[in-house]
Every structure is written in C-alpha cells, then in structure tokens.
Amino acid sequence: MSTSALGLGLAGTIALLTTLAVLVIPFRLRPTISGAGTALVGTAGLAAGAAALAGQSFTLPLPSLLPLSGLSFAVDPLSGVFIAVTGAVAVAAGIYAIGYTSHSGTSRAAAAVLPLFVASLLAVPAAASVATLLACWELMALTSLLLVLTEHKQRPEVAEAGLWYAVMTHLGLVCLLGGLMIFTAHAGGDSFAALAAAAPELSPALKGAVFVLALAGFGSKAGMVPLHAWLPRAHPEAPSHVSALMSAAMVNLGIYGIIRVGFGLLGGGSTWWWLLVIGLGAASAVYGILQAAMSTDLKRLLGYSTTENMGLILVGVGAAGLFASAHHPELAELALAAALLHVANHAGFKTLLFLAAGSVLHATGTRDLDSLGGLRSAMPATTLAFGWGGLAASALPPGTAFVSEWLLVQALIHGLHGATTATAVTLPLAVSAVALTAGLAVATFVKAFGTGFLAKPRTADAAAARESPATMLAGMGLAGAACAALALVPGALLPAIGRAVAAAGWPGPVIRYGTNGLVTIRLAGLAGEVSPLLLTLGLVIVMVATAAWLRALPARRAQGARRRARLWDCGGGPLTARMEYTATSFAEPLQRVFDDVVAPETRLDVTHLDEARYLVAAIEYRAQVPDRIERRLYQPILSAVAAWGSAARWLAPGSVHRYLGYGFYTVTAVLIILTVTR
Amino acid sequence: MLRLWRMIRGTGRIAEPSPPRPARAAAPRGDTDGNVGATMRALRGSVQIRHVDAGSCNGCEVEIGAAFGPVYDAERYGARLVASPRHADALIVTGVVTRNMAEPLRRTHAAIPAPKLVVAIGDCARNCGVFADAYGVAGAAGDIVPVDAEVPGCPPRPEAIVAALRELTGR
C-alpha cells in the first residue's frame, strides 16, 4: 500500500475518531481535541499529498461502501497538489482553532464537524468516479454549511449568510449533477477512466454542454463571478479558522474540478471553452479586487480577495487550455504550472490573513476597519502576520503571489507569438487584467494594513486589544513560514507541480514544462528568468543600506546635531484618531475612479427646522458600495421568485374542497389526454 | 480649447519687466542662525516659503497673492510658496499675532528645518500696527519668533514684498 493511500486512510480514520470523541467528551476538552484532531488529519493529508506529488499514485475501488455505485478513489500528482495544500491549511487552522474556540466557545456540532470537513476536503480530489466525487462534494458542502452556521446565535447575519451559501452551493451541485450525469449516461460508466476513454467519441456540442455545466458548478464553489455572491457573505460569518479552510482550501477544489473535467475527462476541447474561462477569470479577478478595495469589513475584504485570486488561477487554467488547443504545449504547461503554483501560494497567504483577521476579531470583537487601528503596539505578532500576508497577497517581491503571477504573465505574453485572432485579442486583455488586479491588490492591502493595524486606535475596543493566545500565534506562525518558503524558494516546489501538470492530461505530447533551477527559475525555450531569493536579498540589502545611510547623514552635515521636532500637526492641538484616514476615505479616490463600475450609493438626508427652511436641524449621510452584480443579477431573480410564490399562493387558499377539485380535474384531464392520444 | 489657445496667444506675457537686482542690504534685524548672510548662502538662491496668517486683516494676503501672481511673479527670483513648514526654508508672517495663533506660530517656526529665515510682512507683523495694545493681541511677530527681515507698509506693495524676497534669494 502506498504512502498516499495510507495517509488518506489515516486522515479519514482520525477524522472519524475525533468526531466521535468530541461528541462524548466534556465541554472543556472539546476545543483541544477538535483542533488537535483536525491538525492531525491535516498532517496525514499533507503526507498523502506529498507522497502523491512524489509520484506514488494509487487506485482504490470500494464497491460495497455506497449502494448502487460504490466508492472509488485514485490519487495522482494533480490530486496530490490539492490534497497537500488542503492538509497544510488544515494543520495551521487546526492548531489555531484550539485557542480560537476555547475563548469564544463552540457548539458540540461545530467542534465535531470540523475534522469531518477537512476529511471531505481531502476526499474530493481523491475521488475517481462521478458518484464518489458528488458524494464527497455534498459531504463537504454540508459540513462547511454547519461550520458557517456556528455563530448563528450571536449574530443574525450568520443565518442569512448560511441561507445564501446553502442555496448557492446546491445550485452548483445541481449544475454538476446535470453535467456529469449527461456525461456518464453517454460514456457508459461513471469511473473517471471510463469517462476519459469515452470522451473522444462524444459530439462537440455535448462536450461543450458538459463543460459549461461543470464550469458553472465548480466555478460557483470557486467564487467565480457572477456566481460569487455567497462567498463574501459566508466566509466572513464563519469562525476564522473555518474561513481559512474555506477560503484557502475549499475554493481550490472548484479549480481542481475544472482542471480535472476540462483536461483529464473531456481532454481539452474547443477554443471557446477556454476563452470563456479566461473571460470569467479576468472578470472575477478585477471585480473581486475592486470590491475588496472598497470593503471596510476585514473578513469580507479577504473573501473578495479570494474571488480575485481564483480569477487569476482561472485565467491561468484558461490560458493553458487555449495554448493546448492551439498546440503550444510548452506554454500550456507553463500557464497551468503558474495556476497550480498560485493555488498553493494563495492557500498560504489567505490562511495567514484569515487567521490574523480572526486574531483581530478575537481581541477587539469587530471586523470593521473603520473602528480598528493602533493594533501594532498591542498585538505585534498578529500585526506582523497580517503585514507579511498582505505583502504576499500584493504580488510584489518578496511576496508569494509575485512568483506565480510572474509565471502567469510570462505565459500570457509569450502566447502572442503565432497567435490566432481570438488569442491575439484575448491575451493582451488578460495581461492587462492581471496587471490591474495586481495594482489594486496593493492598494487593498495597504488600506487593510495601514488603517487596521497602524495609526491610532479609533475605538476603545481597538485600544483595549491584547495579543492572542499561543496556539493561535502558532497557527499563524506556521502559515507565515509556509508563505516565506513559497516566496523564497518556489523552485523547490516546481518539479512537483510539473508532475501535477503532466498528470492533468491534455492531448498532445507532455514536455517537461519549461522551468528549472532552485534559486533562479529559468523558462526553458522562453526568454525569462527570475530569482525570488536573490531579489529579496537585494531588496533587504538596499533597505538596510538606505537606513544606515540616513542614520549616518546628519553626522556628516556641517550643521551637525540631529534635532528632535514635534510631529507636525498643522500647529493646532494634538492629532486625534478622528483625523486619521479611515478605510472608507482611503478607498474614496479609487471608488471615484471606478465610479461607473462599482456604482456606490450615497444618501443625504437633510432635516430642516420647522421654523425656517434655511436652518438645518440634522444631516444624515450614508454611503455604501453594494455588490453590483448581486444587485443587478440576483435581486431581479429573487424578486421574480418571490412574485411567483405570491402568485402561486392564490392557487392554494387552504380550502380542502378546492384541493380535492384540483385532484379530480387533474386525474380527469390526464385520462382524457391518454384517451385522445392513444 | 481653441479659444483658450487664442486667448493665451493674444494675452502674451504680462509679467512686469524685472527691476534691477536690489543692492544687498545688511540683515535688518535679529539673527537666528548666527548670521542671515550664511543662511542665505546655504539656501543658494532658492527659498521655499511657508506663510502664516497670525491674525491679519487679509490686506497683506492680497498683496502676497499679487506678488506671486503673473504680474509680479516672485517665483522667477527663486521664491516659492509651499504648503507645509516641513518643506520650507523661510516663514513669512502677516498680521498681528493673536493669542490663539501665538502657539501655532511657534510650532510652525519649530517645524521648519534649519537653516531658516523669518520675514514679517506688513506693519501689524512688524509692530502691531493699528492693533497695538488691543484685546487678544499677543504681540508683534518679533515677540513670538525671531524675525530676520521686515517689509513695512499697510499693506506693503507687491513690489516691496518681491524686493524683500529677492534679498533673501539674492537673485
């Protein structure tokens, strides 16, 4: 039995045992057991994923475990990437959960479901048949829904977020079910091997329909625009370690599904599929980061940032498909490698950011950036964690996102050589979308870090913040260390990613895709190389040298002495927290620039005195940036459904006579129709 | 747009011809950093100025505005108004220093990096002018911060302000 099978089996066993243990043990021990069990499940998953990446594949049919179809599992390097990432996130989140839940308290159900959720996350990429995939997918959806609802007694918004999540995730499931069932029906078997073998004989229209349905189903889980509406609601309302698991591990599985179905099962397909994926990905990236830049809720901001990063990954996946269908295998592999590397990078920094945001929430009781501030002195470790995570998310060296976005841009730029019209139009647009996204991400995280952690505390709660317990810091520390490793030596991970890319399986020859080198990543066959480690070293040297030079400067001046001066506050009284930039005011110029896109709503109510119109009694100003897609796309549908519901109520007034009448007339009508048509 | 272009061409240059460089006068009053001449040499003909209205009737402000306007154009001699004392080399004070503005004036002076110069513009800033001994007056500019140069007049003419600034820039 291979290590990966052993690891996955161990993960499942530990998860079940932890769940059973949590159900019986007393209240005090619950957070520790649940968190430690989750971390162990994650460790086992990480080991399994690493083994799979190292090339230890396995297939395990379990025909008797589920009635009718049975379960069947198989792991290849592509699954390995997602299993390893999920496992690593679960280790950090599990350790963090010990401290987080022992303070805020957790329900028995939430503590029991946490390890099961992680186990289901590990099982989805290991599924080797449609029935297994759907069963694990649904287990994942239900367990995560329970976890989202953990704090429903404390805050009424949680229930609403849970409702959105439940409905959207099941609509996604319906799409998946539809798409994969059509596929299975035409393939004559529900194992992935049978599907992949049958795919070349299917008609292009059928394959297109399957792909679009799968894209909708998996894309909604990945937070792809316009199916993202649940994500910025559910992720903030969940407890922070669950947010981290959802945002860093669960959404990835949507990407996994698209890669698996698009490349592995359908075998590439038409160009328009991938143009669609690139378009939706670019829209998600730009829209997500724009909403994140406007957001003042720390965790909502991170949720939108997840949509953004999934968008970037989708651009990579779409570009890979486009290049594969245009017979540029080396570029396709590079683009898919960039996407997979970004999956790992995003998981690293998003875990770190959500855990740090949870630490802030734990210490201050608020997620509103406009009422935070000044956490630097009270919570230095959390501030460091969020700062490092923000840097990683900003696509600037020495951040992790820099390497993967650089690879992505390289792939997109080199694709222009010998391109068709569609490609020649799409690729520059995709490059500009990636560039715009990177710029806005910097603004977003400068805002989040600057207004949330630096400056003066804006409220008493923020001023009274205390550093979080050691287990929470340990969770953040692990995530931070993973980010550092990914940022500085991504070359160590690239060979494994290369095996995963080879396992994705599109038609055509599999070239060892063109990156090599541990310290310096060189693109074989393309002009381009980057060395994150040397770049970081150079940056550190320049910063230290500049600081030393500035320190030495006054001593060399003729005038000599360094003078201590008061902070310039325009000569008036001391600066107060009210004078600081808030998150809203920091984002205001951006909001003005993108006025037509985000459509902010402002309301100004002026109340006049009764005696005279010219005298004002009160002015009320409200500004908010609603999710425009939600407003324009979902609201009409929701109101239409509500109107249908009200209209249908007329049919059901509660009179038994009428219901009997319905039955009678329906049966009569059916009989008449049968008589006439026979 | 075309109209604007035509107007620019039709109007032409309206700045007055530059009067001859004033003979360097001795430093009129107190010396902050040992020696005004040394400060002026350190500034090398480029003086960034922060203006503080310590309690003026705004007559002097109108004239300062005129001095930096297109007609007198003080900027061609190297003097320039800036928005923060942190960017400034010189402080110009107008108006009698009121009680509320005494501390902000001190702080503004302290906020200017050395070497620095202070110019009192108008009679109020020089010696309280018509507001001497009035309620709420803390004193002339020289009573609060060390003044290096003065421009008399109520209000002083823009030419006088420009001449004083040219003495500082030496251009």
Image (cartoon, coloured by chain):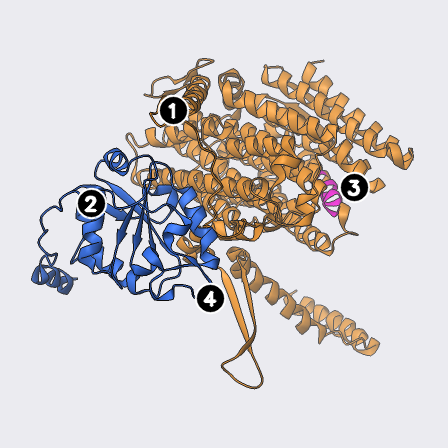
Measuring from the top left, give residue A71's x and y in whole percent: 72, 30
Chain-order first, disc 4 or disc 2: 4
Could you tell me how far apart the alpha carbons at marks 3 and 4 are, in whole angstroms?
Answer: 61 Å
Identified by mark 2, the residue type is: Glu
Identified by mark 1, the residue type is: Leu
Q: Which residue is mark 2?
A: B167
Q: Is residue A30 magenta?
A: no
Which chain wears blue?
Answer: B
Query: Magenta residues?
Result: A140-149
Measuring from the top left, give residue A364's x and y in whole percent: 69, 44
Residue drawn at the location 49% of the way across and 81% of the way down: A614
Q: Which residue is mark 3?
A: A104
Q: Left of A115 or right of it: where is A403?
A: left
Q: Chain of mark 2?
A: B
Could you tell me how far apart the alpha carbons at marks 1 and 2 are, in whole angstroms?
Answer: 30 Å
Could you tell me how far apart the alpha carbons at marks 3 and 2 are, in whole angstroms?
Answer: 70 Å
User: Vertically, is B130 above or below A210?
Assistant: below
Q: Quadrant of the C terminus of chain B?
A: top left
Q: Which residue is mark 1?
A: A553
Report crowding for label 1: few under 14, some 14 to 19, many 20 or more residues within 10 A (C-alpha). few
Local secondary structure at mark 1: helix
